[in-house]
Image (spheres, rainbow, N blue to C red):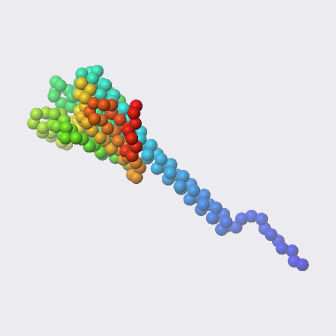
Amino acid sequence: MRLRVTRAGFTFIEIFIVMAIIGVLAGVVILHSISADRARDVETEARRLAELIELARAEAVSGNESWGVFVDQTRYGFLVHDELASAWRAASKSTFRTRNTPEGVVLSLQQSDWGASSRQLARGQDGQATEEEEGDANPRIPQVLILASGEQTPFLISIRAGGHPPWSVTSDGISRTRASRADQPEERT
């Protein structure tokens, strides 16, 4: 009779298969985490922009000034109209500094026809941009006007990142500026 010797332990193939499964699971968790972060970035930016516009609106009313908002694909900022110089200047408070969106987050602005006339009003009677405005990295003409009366240009700003549901920041020009996910009803705050 021969005794059979058995060895305890795992073979290289078994260990390799387990390590591959752990690697795949770790990859899925990391990708999900990155995706969740991007979705959170979109929501945070939408809510921040809506609150900043409302804060600028309060500043315009309390200071009896005209304010403005400029938006391009990757940044937005706030301007105050200097009546003496008849020009738009960057808001001096750090709260209203020009903000860049997180990487991969894109903004787009839609306005009604009134928005086009607000741009004409913001530029002046001739509607022409100066050379300084055309070549300037910080636009000096807002796309959204916020008047001292509290009224503002009606607008819709879409905020997107990859395949995530977009968020919208909207105002009809009189009501409070709101942030909501584009595929859900507006949130009432």
The image quadrant of residue 112 is: top left
112 or 124: nearer the viewer: 112
Question: Can residue 155 be seen in this snapshot?
Answer: yes
Q: Please provide percent x and percent y for residue 182.
A: 37, 44
Q: Residue pushed farthest front?
A: 185
Name the quadrant of the N terminus: bottom right
Residue that extends furthest to the left in the rendered view of this protein: 126
In the image shown, does 186 or 16 lie closer to the viewer? 186
Work out which residue is located at the far bottom of the displayed protein and give it: 1
* Quadrant hosting residue 122: top left
The front one of 145 and 126 is 145
Where residue 157 appears, as percent x and y from the top left, is 31, 41
Horizontal placement of 51 versus 135: left or right? right
Q: Who's the residue at 19% across and 35% down the image?
A: 118
Residue drawn at x 16%, y 27% as measured from the top left = 85
Query: In the visual, does 104 lie left or right of 86?
Result: right
Q: Is residue 130 visible?
A: no
| Quadrant of image for the C terminus | top left
Q: Decide: is 27 above or below 56.
A: below
